[in-house]
Image (cartoon, rainbow, N blue to C red):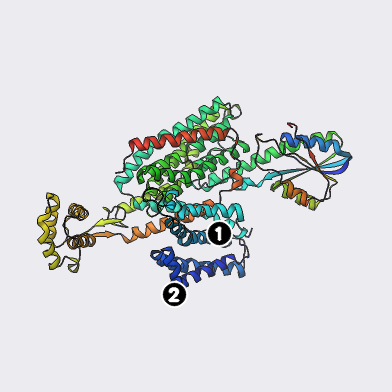
Amino acid sequence: MVYTKKHPALLIMGVLLVALAVATDAGLLDGIVGYLKIGSKTGEMTGMSYLFGIIAVAVGAWHMWGKHEEGNLDYYLSSVGGAIFILFIAMIVTWFAAPWVAVVSKSMGPVMGAKYLHDVLGLNYVVLGILAGIITVNVFKIPGWAENGVRLSRLGLKTGVILLGTLYSLAELAHLGKLSVVMIGFFVLGSVGLVLFLGRRRKIPNSMGGVLSAGMGVCGVSATVAAAPVVQAKPTEIAYTIGTILIWGVGCMFLFPVIGHVLDLGHIQFGAWAGTGILNSAQVAGAALAYQPDGIETLKVAEIFNITRVLFLPLIVLWLAVWYVRREETAAGTQVNVGKVVFEKFPLFVLGFILMFALSSTGIFAPAQHYKGKYFDNDIAESKLLTGEDVALLTSEAAKVQSPAQAGALARLIEGRKIANIDDDAAIRGLTNAKVLSKDANNVLKKAHKVVYHTAKMIKKFRQWITWLFAFGLTGLGMQITGAAMRQAGGQPLVIGGVVGTIKAVLSLIVILLFVSETI
Amino acid sequence: MTAARILLASHGTPGARAAEQAALSLCAREGTIWHLEVVPDFWKGMRGDDWLNNTVTQQRFGDYVESQLERELAEHAAALSREVLSLGLAYENLSILGKPADCLLEVVSRESFDLVVIGSPRPKGTPGYRSRMKMETLVRGLRVPLFIAPHPDR
């Protein structure tokens, strides 16, 4: 079968992207850039548009005029159309639609404390990207030439999670890992058990109980897909379950950030809550990025919870397989192949995440002591030391400092003309924030901190790639959420799923408010 | 009133069973009943936003759903064909993936029929797939007499 479709769409998108790059580079869009306040993104707009525009033009020309024969080249190049289609929409949303929504929202003034409407509703590039995907598939349909490539969004998300491994410190991973195992362990097992219990009370078939419990308990549609053949679910049961989960997932993705802002949850609290309470793992990532669009601290927490859930998946599928065989006469005598179930359901990309974390810990991407891609290093050039004038200013104001730790750090700074160690760096930052010294002296302290506190270039790049991989992946996943599938929500799964989903979301929020702090 | 070539759209629900009985009673002696079974196209989006599973698991799910749908179609076709053949009528079967009204119109455009028989929409609250025959699409596109059997629960 030849997958490539002779169609000009990819070529046209390529030309548009190159035109965008040229226009941005030449300053033709300065008016729009100023209005939308996207000056910091123009470098990205030029670079990415050139890169992907040229790729799209080249592959698009091959789609139009190349000779297409069955084989790997045809298969892989046919997917470029769909991938660029997703990226094109993600770019428009990220660079133009989301900033425009922010401008309009800010013009309306704050609606909750200092927060604007788009902050409260989480209307940023991620949520708008998912919405754009959902609208595309349900209103316009995915064009034939893009169908093959839209599936690549999964690869984008998995790659994003793998790269995310570079951003954790050991302490962070250990703390979040423990927290997620406790939370997920309790709520996964609890909701699987509750669905099975309610299923028995409401006399639903074992196959329906099995597939619904996996979906409600572990990771939504992914768990349903994994468990359905194991518990021999009927098509109607699968349709009801997936429809119910999709409606819940999409609803929670919008609702959770709003509740989070109302309760003023911290990044760790929100990430942990979304990672536990939202059924579908894609929407967990969506909600986390919706809650904190200008950083990925919430996403980091949420993804650890996601990974923990995924690691629970083979165990839950195994449990359901054994449970089903014991209860169902038609399956009696069937042997559950434990090794096969665990091996097949094991998420290989988690190994990639662990590998990237291990590599990052060796200092290959940034010094091992880095935190969020930043690290202390006072081995600096002579030209970056404080000047005699700076030292004189600090010396003249040193007496104002009362704290012994800050006074000591300041004395060592004056003596060595650079911050002596990481503890002194923390003390100097504390002194700066306390505004004990004059404005000029504070500027000297800031300068001294800046020259010893470095951003790892590679980690900075990773953060940028991660943001784009998630934007790409979630926009593409939006294109796979059909209204027709959501409309299948119904029957007992809707009733039982509604009860268990609500209990899980509310209870996990209470637990997080009571027991999860904002520090690691 | 009888018809020699009847296109019957049925997928085994109570409403469709009423359509089957209507088609059997309306079919002329030695006539043919063409049984159309539509697999709703929402199944194409039923893997939803699953991104965690590997290809093996996704393929297994796809194969499993396909086999289950095929089994349901085959069981239903076998039951109806027995009934049709026992009355001395001829039976033909067609299965198509798509939207019910579009599929029915496509079949009607390919073959000639004297009558199309369908069931009426199920009453609200009755369990079943949300994949209904769009009556406006059907009625606008159909050039063959249409018989809608009343739902047994009404």
Q: Is residue A81 visible?
A: yes
Q: Nearer the viewer, residue A485 or A139?
A: A139
Q: Where does label 1 land, which residue?
A: A82
Left/right placement of residue B90 relative to residue B11 reads: right
Left/right placement of residue A143 relative to residue B21 reads: left
Residue A225: x percent and y percent? Answer: 54, 41
Q: Nearer the viewer, residue A309 or A74?
A: A309
Q: SS at mark 2?
A: loop
Residue A184: x percent and y percent? Answer: 41, 37
Left/right placement of residue B45 relative to residue A219 reads: right
| Quadrant showing the C terminus of chain A | top left
Residue B32: x percent and y percent? Answer: 85, 42
Name the kind of residue labelled 1 in the image.
Gly
Cα distance between the residues tagged 2 and 1? 29 Å
Residue at x 79% of width, y 53% of height: B109
| Mark 2 closeness class: few <14, some 14–19, many ≥20 residues within 10 Å | few
Q: Chain of mark 2?
A: A
Name of the residue lying farthest toward the front? A108
Q: Where does label 2 land, which residue?
A: A26
Nearer to us: label 2 or label 1: 2
Left/right placement of residue A382 relative to residue A161 reads: left
Numbered mark located on residue A446 in the image: none
Name of the residue lying farthest toward the top? A201
Quadrant housing residue A307? top left
